[in-house]
Image (cartoon, grey):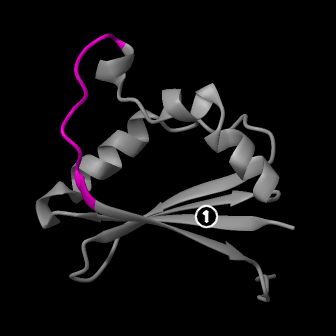
């Protein structure tokens, strides 16, 4: 059964564009992981400062395999770090991981 993992990242109001830039720089890094089904970065459209990173996985085991893989650490390093430089300052001030499974819904035709 598909599981949904949502990383709710709170950023300073002026840091949202930097968060989006950092995600764009590593786009596709998880695409080839076994059991990975999709990813979205959701930007708030109101005065909130919490962005949502939504990933879908075949099952909990596939998600855990990715978290425990070398690809996870590599994918969460910046380009500067991969090039041997220092890590950039974090843009997130808080982060929570939420876990869900699909309990219902519909599809548009």
Closer to us: 28 or 10: 10
Q: Magenta span has 89?
A: yes
Q: Position of residue 86 (x, y in %)?
A: 22, 21
For residue 74, side relative to residue 46 (left or right):
right
Secondary structure under tag 1 reads strand
Residue at the location (68% across, 40% down)?
66
Q: Main secondary structure of the magenta part?
A: loop
Q: Is residue 63 above or below residue 71?
A: below
**For the magenta stretch, what is the residue range?**
83-93
For residue 109, side relative to residue 45 (left or right):
right
Packing grade of label 1 (10 A; few <14, some 14-19, many >=20) is: many
Q: Position of residue 100 (x, y in %)?
A: 67, 75
Q: Is residue 22 above or below residue 60?
A: above
In what quadrant of the picture does the C terminus appear?
A: bottom right
Q: Is residue 94 above or below residue 18?
A: below
In what quadrant of the picture does the N terminus appear?
A: bottom right
Q: Which residue is mark 1?
A: 5
Q: Position of residue 94 (x, y in %)?
A: 29, 63
Q: Evaluate whether residue 39 shows in this view.
A: yes
State the image quarter where residue 85 is shown: top left
State the image quarter where residue 81 is shown: top left
For residue 23, side relative to residue 94 (left or right):
right
Residue at the location (73% across, 37% down)?
33
Residue furthest top in the image: 84
Q: Is residue 10 above or below residue 61?
A: below
């Amino acid at each position: 059964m598909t599981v949904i993992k949502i990383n709710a990242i709170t950023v300073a109001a002026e840091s949202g564009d930097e968060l989006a830039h950092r995600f764009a720089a590593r786009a596709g890094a998880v695409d080839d992981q076994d059991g990975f089904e999709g990813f979205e970065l959701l930007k708030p459209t109101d005065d909130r400062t919490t962005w949502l990173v939504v990933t879908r996985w075949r099952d909990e085991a596939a998600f855990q395999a990715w978290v425990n893989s070398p690809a996870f650490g590599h994918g969460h390093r910046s380009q500067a770090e991969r090039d041997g430089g220092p890590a950039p300052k974090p843009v997130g001030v808080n982060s929570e991981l939420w876990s869900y499974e699909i309990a219902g819904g519909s599809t548009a035709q």
